[in-house]
Image: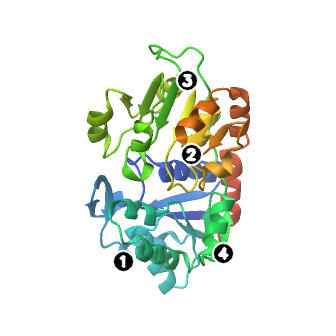
Amino acid sequence: MRKILLVTDAWAPQVNGVTRVLNAHIDGLKERGYEVSVIEPGQFRTMPLPMYPEIRLALFARRRIATIIDKIKPDAIHIVTEGPLGWAARSVCLKHRIPFTTWYHTKFQLYVDVRLHGLLGPIHWLMRRFHSKAVRTMVSTESLKCELEVDGFKNVVVVPLGVDIIQFIRNSSPPLPPLPKPVFVYFSRIAPEKSPEEFLKLKLSGTKLVIGDGPDRAKLEKKYGKENKFVGYKRGQELVDWLSLADVFIFPSRTETFGLVVLEALACGIPVAAHSCVGPRDIITEGKDGYLSEDLALAALKCLVLSRDDCRATAEKYSWEHSSETFIKNLFFIR
């Protein structure tokens, strides 16, 4: 049985795109008979990430990672994130001349720039350096691959992501009180890098529904709660039920590398209004399942006449099975 070692700074109880992709691929690996081990922050002494205390950063991990690699003797090592564990694992692999692959999941330099202006260039340089020694760096879209290659990244390959089309299917009779129509929904992390305030400021009739939680929720709910309905974080069928009330999904983020929530909305038959940036422009066909524009209110209104069936058909093109197969194909097997 081949052994795969995954190294990640993002792990439960965090709920984000990285952990969802990781869990889907772990399931795919196990279904195909691979033995999967994960190095994650819970195995180490940690400290909270400033501004995001729910995210824990592992400390002094290098020696223990080296011991784990020596003990497991994995056939492939994949580094999922560019955090402290990712850097420590990279260092160990380089020291012992062990090939590894990486994944460029997050435009971390843009996340930092939202909070701390002036660090965009240095952080981007660090990101490029981190991935420079990988046998392959995986990304989720062709446009991101092209963008990174222009910036000097090497050995970039595309591993498309997926959506659970069994879970995300519109409920025609959700057990929830009806909302004034039309219903425009935002569902994502409520944090500056996701630009939720842009959604909250939009002048639209009907209901603006906010699903999610995050460090800025309390502040934004206090400021915009009268014009927007905040319902908090939802998951599973409860999330699907709330989405089933929606007519249009508005996605204001400009920092994505993919945007799993776009696929989840489409799977529920909800057209998408978004900016023309990496992620949405790789998924959305304008006039069929959404519109891309700098004017999100106009794009959202244009989405109201689009077919739910066409939205669903787009989502059905993306499967976790294909994603896992492509992921495995691009791992580098040491032995």
Frontmost of labels 2 and 1 is 2
Disc 4 residue type? Asn
Q: Earlier in the sequence, mark 4 or mark 1?
A: 1
Q: Earlier in the sequence, mark 3 or mark 4?
A: 4
Q: Nearer the viewer, residue 211 or 32?
A: 211
Element assignment for label 3: loop
Residue lying at 66% horizontally and 61% vertically, measured from the top left: 143
| Residue at image mark 2 | 260
Frontmost of labels 4 and 1 is 4
Q: Where is residue 17 drawn, in percent x and y?
A: 50, 50
Frontmost of labels 3 and 1 is 3
Residue 2 visible somewhere in the drawing: no
Q: Nearer the viewer, residue 220 or 243?
A: 220
| Residue at image mark 3 | 244
Q: Earlier in the sequence, mark 3 or mark 1?
A: 1
Give residue 63's mark: 1
The answer for how far apart the CA atoms under marks 2 and 3 are is 17 Å
The answer for how far apart the CA atoms under marks 4 and 1 are is 28 Å
Q: Nearer the viewer, residue 154 or 306?
A: 306
Element assignment for label 2: helix
Disc 2 residue type? Leu
Residue lying at 70% horizontally and 58% vertically, measured from the top left: 326
Disc 4 to disc 1: CB gap under 8 Å: no
The answer for how far apart the CA atoms under marks 2 and 1 are is 35 Å
Frontmost of labels 3 and 4 is 3
Element assignment for label 4: loop
Horizontal arrangement in the rendering, residue 11 relative to residue 324 (left or right): left
**Neighbourhood count class around disc 2 (C-alpha, 10 Å): few under 14, some 14–19, many 20 upward:** many
The answer for how far apart the CA atoms under marks 3 and 1 are is 49 Å
